[in-house]
Image (tube, helix red, strand yellow):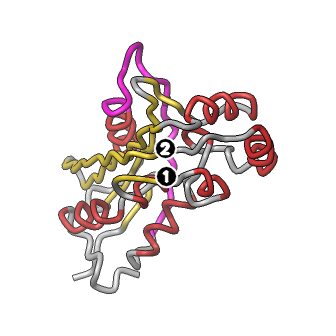
Amino acid sequence: MTRPRLILGSGSPRRRELLGQLGVVADDIRPPDIDETPAKSELPRPYCVRMALEKAQAVQADDSDIVLSADTTVALGRRILGKPADAAEAAKFLLAMSGRRHRVITALAVRRGTRIWQRDVVTQVKMKVLSDAELSAYLDTEDWQGKAGGYGIQGPAGAFIPWISGSFTAVVGLPLTETATLLQTAGFPVWKGSR
């Protein structure tokens, strides 16, 4: 029996790399085009779950294909810190998190035909107090672009994170334990030569 086709509903190179750690290469990459604006007074975790589900449903696929989508949201209390529009907004986000704990939520959705499986993972993250020099040097790297909260733990900003409680791969953008479980549940053979 041939394995089903896997479609990654994300343009994130980090998610492709993380799938590669499972020995999985998506057959196709189809980033969905959806409105990612939070609803009025929507809380971070329900927002993140809604985004992952909407992304999975927006991807065109055959009924036999498996679609994997995810969303990563940075939450500071009840606030959603999305992808910064520019360096000034990135600085604002980073200064708000400086010296404090925040949550990184990554929600997954796997769809095959009309069935959808969903999980979300919440990781507590502490950011050290940032000096003006550190903030300025980091903004100059432009690593903040396209990243929720304005940072990626796997890049230069990893030096700002002394402590996490939860899943490191979820903070990067795809919790591997949950991803492998959902793919296997949907009928994708993660550990059986899935290349």
Look at the image and tell me in which quarter the N terminus lies. bottom left
At a point 63% along the width and 52% down the height, the residue shown is 157
At a point 29% along the width and 65% down the height, the residue shown is 177
At a point 50% along the width and 36% down the height, the residue shown is 100
Does 178 sit above or below residue 17? Answer: above
Q: Farthest residue toward the bottom?
A: 193
Which of the two residues, 23 or 100, is positioned nearer the viewer here?
100
Give the prevailing secondary structure in the magenta stretch. loop
Tell me where the magenta segment starts and ends, as one range: 26-47
Q: Which residue is mark 1?
A: 10
Which of the two residues, 187 or 92, is positioned nearer the viewer here?
92
User: Considering the numbered disc 1 on the image, is that residue within a helix, a strand or a loop?
Assistant: loop
Verify CB contact (< 8 Å) between mark 1 and mark 2: no
Q: Position of residue 46 (x, y in %)?
A: 31, 30
Q: Which residue is mark 2?
A: 32
Q: Quadrant of residue 182?
A: bottom left
How far apart marks 1 and 2 lie (CA) works out to 7 Å
The amino acid on which the numbered mark 1 sits, given as a three-letter code, is: Ser
